[in-house]
């Protein structure tokens, strides 16, 4: 069957070829994906654990709280496989007292989205720390927002975070000084932090008050503690 | 709402110009930019394919790929290639004039990495259907702009005294570097929001 | 039900195995000579590390696709061959994406969307159509290895220039004194175009020099050679 000039190959044969190739391809991908999934998840979990440790200053342990039906719960809600459930992490010190929450934040940076982890203490209304997880900011110029000189300033900063331009006098206490030459990226980080906290703060407050209420009622293990309605995730 | 769309449009067209900032679709940028008229047509054909891509990617993401994101690359490439092929046949049948103007570029565009990149970026950024379309138009206009700018410089270059060793791709790359530097100036555009 | 492989290009002798291997590294180097796969050549060559990671990932896809395509080349019907090749390439790219995420997560993050975009690299489909679809598995593997080596070489060359000028380092090791003020622009998009432009200029200059030197040699040979040898020498000079 000389294809270019001879008789036309019947369609079913062509479909058979493509179908067989597609099936083999799908099978190979699914097999490799399943085989490597634990490793990828372990890596992601490692990154998250490290970031939690950094922004909550090495808590003795941390719990995951899941967002389900507009409220935080301590058990993972049952969902379809593959759906991402939003979550925060609650850190405790050695005596078992809660120290604060680690929350992941995403915001549009100079080129791509910046992903970061922020530690927040609702009792003081202040930040505990901040770490950039992922950024594609301009190398050599704006990637300094990842560096400690910038991120360190978030520790102890009041919420909402106020970004200040660098002045000879130095910043007001609690302010974050933006990096010269990376103003856009600095502002993007501050904005991402503020928007995330604005969204999560009411949820955390209800969760905490729910915990106190159940503790007062003598219930040891609170399940669903709050019923805050979640404002829709804001886009840029 | 409108602000979001304007932001996506300007970002895709100028700040993150597909060709001059993101290095996508360079084969046609380096190969088919000798004449302005050709460049404009290629750019418009590009925009058209990007729109088809955006629609296909939105549909795939919404109904097929949310349960199997690891099949994304294979699914995108096959569906986009088939969609372009089908559109090409449709145009050839219904509008031979349009086919002569734009259609000859379609096979060239299908393998252009800008097309797949659009589908992937749209997915990664979680654009809605409408935002995806705006993104495609912005990216397409950005490509057209880059192609046209390059072609108009190259038309002048025909009569310029370029050193023998720089003729060809080398001088085009160095001009592109200048254009790219100019586009970096758009970076501040989005900071106001 | 055998598909007919595309006809041999007439008037061309068959290449040897060594030629198949070495072709991609210098004479038909995909980046520096054939100008294929331009997008990654400029997009991810800001550092040598990323250049090598991209080269290795592309090598994985190219070598395995070449082997697969040459294995199934007699089974695949002619009409659907390009579609099948694209499917094979896309499968290996998807596998590369999953495997890099699992094995070298840092590089996977740095390369980002450019791993999926390997599918669009003209080098891959080009080699399948031009070589693997008409040659044995062994030769196709050699061709794939050679082409990938050439591609990695090209990427690393551009990466070297950009990283040294843009940051004063090579593969993270400082090579220029700290007093050197880095040309940050070399790491930014314009530097991608400029860096690759410089490499092409240098190559063109080298070939120009070589040609002139050969011409001078030939001229000398013509003048000094006895009269009966002049004609062939002149012929060679042309």
Image: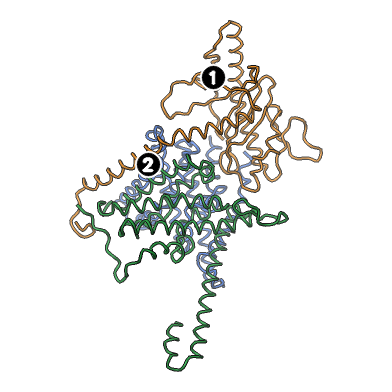
Chain colours: A orange, B blue, C green
* Pick the front one: A206 or C30: C30
Whole-number angstrom distance, CA of label 2 to CA of label 1: 36 Å
- Is residue C184 among what the camera can see? no
Badge 2 density bin: few <14, some 14–19, many ≥20, Cα 10 Å:
many
Quarter of the image for the C terminus of chain A: give it.
top right
Residue at 54 percent of width and 61 percent of height? B173
Looking at the rendered structure, which numbered label has been put on residue B145? none
Dot 1 falls on a residue whose secondary structure is strand
* Pick the front one: A49 or C114: A49
Badge 1 density bin: few <14, some 14–19, many ≥20, Cα 10 Å:
many
- In the picture, measured across the screen, residue B193 lies left or right of residue A74, that is right
Q: Position of residue B167 (x, y in %)?
A: 52, 69
Residue at 56 percent of width and 49 percent of height? B14
Quarter of the image for the N terminus of chain A: give it.
bottom left
The reply to whether discs 2 and 1 touch (Cβ–Cβ < 8 Å) is no
According to the picture, the residue beneath numbered tag 1 turns out to be A72
Dot 2 falls on a residue whose secondary structure is helix
Choose top left, top right, bottom left or bottom right for residue C145: bottom left
Q: Position of residue A214 (x, y in %)?
A: 58, 9
According to the picture, the residue beneath numbered tag 2 turns out to be B75
Chain ID for label 2? B
| Residues marked 2 and 1, same chain | no
- In the picture, measured across the screen, residue A138 lies left or right of residue B98, that is right
- Is residue C134 among what the camera can see? yes
Residue at the right extreme of this rendering: A169
* Pick the front one: B190 or C2: C2
Q: Position of residue B143 (x, y in %)?
A: 49, 52
Image: A181 above or below A219: below
Q: Position of residue A193 (x, y in %)?
A: 63, 31
Residue at the top extreme of this rendering: A217
């Amino acid at each position: 069957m000389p294809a270019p000039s001879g008789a036309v190959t019947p369609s079913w044969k062509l479909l058979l070829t493509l179908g067989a190739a597609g099936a083999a391809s799908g099978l190979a991908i699914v097999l490799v994906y399943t085989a490597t999934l634990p490793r990828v998840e372990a890596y992601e979990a490692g990154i998250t654990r490290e970031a939690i440790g950094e922004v909550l200053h090495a808590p003795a342990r941390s719990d995951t709280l899941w967002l389900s039906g507009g409220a935080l719960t301590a058990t993972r809600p049952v969902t379809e496989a593959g759906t991402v459930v939003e979550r925060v992490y609650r850190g405790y010190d050695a005596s078992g007292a809660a120290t604060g929450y680690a929350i992941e934040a995403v915001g549009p940076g100079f080129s791509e989205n910046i992903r970061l982890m922020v530690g927040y203490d609702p009792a003081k209304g202040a930040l505990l720390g901040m770490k950039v997880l992922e950024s594609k900011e301009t190398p050599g110029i704006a990637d300094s927002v990842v560096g400690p000189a910038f991120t360190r300033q978030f520790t102890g900063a009041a919420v909402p975070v106020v970004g200040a331009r660098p002045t000879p006098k130095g910043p007001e206490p609690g302010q974050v000084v933006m990096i010269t030459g990376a103003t856009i990226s600095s502002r993007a980080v501050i904005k991402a932090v503020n928007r995330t906290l604005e969204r999560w703060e009411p949820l955390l407050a209800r969760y905490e008050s729910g915990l106190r209420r159940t503790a007062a009622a003598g219930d040891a293990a609170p399940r669903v503690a709050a019923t805050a309605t979640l404002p829709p995730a804001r886009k840029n | 709402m409108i602000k979001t769309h304007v932001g996506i449009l300007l970002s895709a067209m100028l700040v993150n110009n597909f060709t001059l900032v993101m290095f996508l679709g360079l084969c046609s940028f380096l190969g088919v930019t000798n004449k302005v008229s050709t460049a404009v047509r290629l750019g418009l054909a590009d925009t058209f394919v990007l729109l088809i891509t955006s629609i296909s990617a939105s549909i795939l993401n919404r109904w097929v790929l949310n349960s199997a994101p690891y099949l994304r690359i294979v699914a995108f490439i096959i569906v986009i290639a088939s969609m372009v092929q089908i559109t090409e046949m449709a145009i050839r049948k219904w509008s031979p004039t349009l086919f002569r103007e734009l259609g000859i570029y379609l096979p060239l565009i299908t393998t252009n990495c800008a097309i797949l990149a659009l589908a992937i970026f749209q997915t990664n950024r979680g654009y809605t259907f409408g935002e995806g379309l705006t993104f495609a138009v912005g990216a397409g206009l950005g490509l057209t702009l880059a192609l046209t700018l390059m072609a108009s410089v190259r038309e002048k270059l025909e009569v310029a005294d370029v050193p023998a060793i720089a003729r060809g791709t080398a001088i085009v790359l160095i001009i592109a570097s200048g254009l790219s530097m100019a586009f970096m100036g758009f970076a501040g555009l989005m900071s106001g929001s | 039900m055998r598909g007919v492989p595309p006809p041999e290009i007439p008037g061309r002798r068959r290449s040897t195995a060594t030629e198949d291997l070495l072709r991609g590294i210098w004479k038909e180097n995909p980046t520096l000579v054939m100008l294929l796969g331009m997008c990654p050549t400029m997009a991810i060559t800001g550092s040598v590390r990323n250049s090598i990671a991209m080269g290795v990932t592309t090598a994985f896809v190219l070598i395995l696709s070449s082997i697969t395509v040459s294995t199934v080349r007699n089974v695949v019907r002619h009409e659907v061959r390009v579609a099948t090749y694209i499917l094979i390439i896309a499968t290996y790219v998807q596998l590369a994406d999953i495997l890099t995420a699992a094995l070298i997560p840092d590089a996977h993050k740095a390369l980002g969307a450019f791993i999926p975009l390997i599918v669009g690299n003209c080098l891959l489909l080009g080699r399948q159509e031009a070589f693997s679809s008409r040659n044995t598995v062994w030769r196709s593997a050699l061709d794939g290895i050679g082409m990938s080596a050439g591609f990695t070489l090209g990427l690393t060359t551009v990466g070297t220039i950009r990283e040294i000028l843009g940051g004063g380092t090579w593969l993270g090791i400082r090579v220029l004194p700290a007093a050197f003020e880095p040309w940050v622009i070399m790491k930014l998009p314009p530097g991608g175009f400029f860096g690759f432009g410089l490499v092409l200029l240098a190559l063109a200059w080298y070939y120009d020099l070589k040609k002139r030197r050969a011409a001078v040699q030939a001229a000398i040979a013509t003048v000094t050679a006895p009269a009966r040898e002049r004609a062939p020498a002149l012929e060679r000079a042309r």
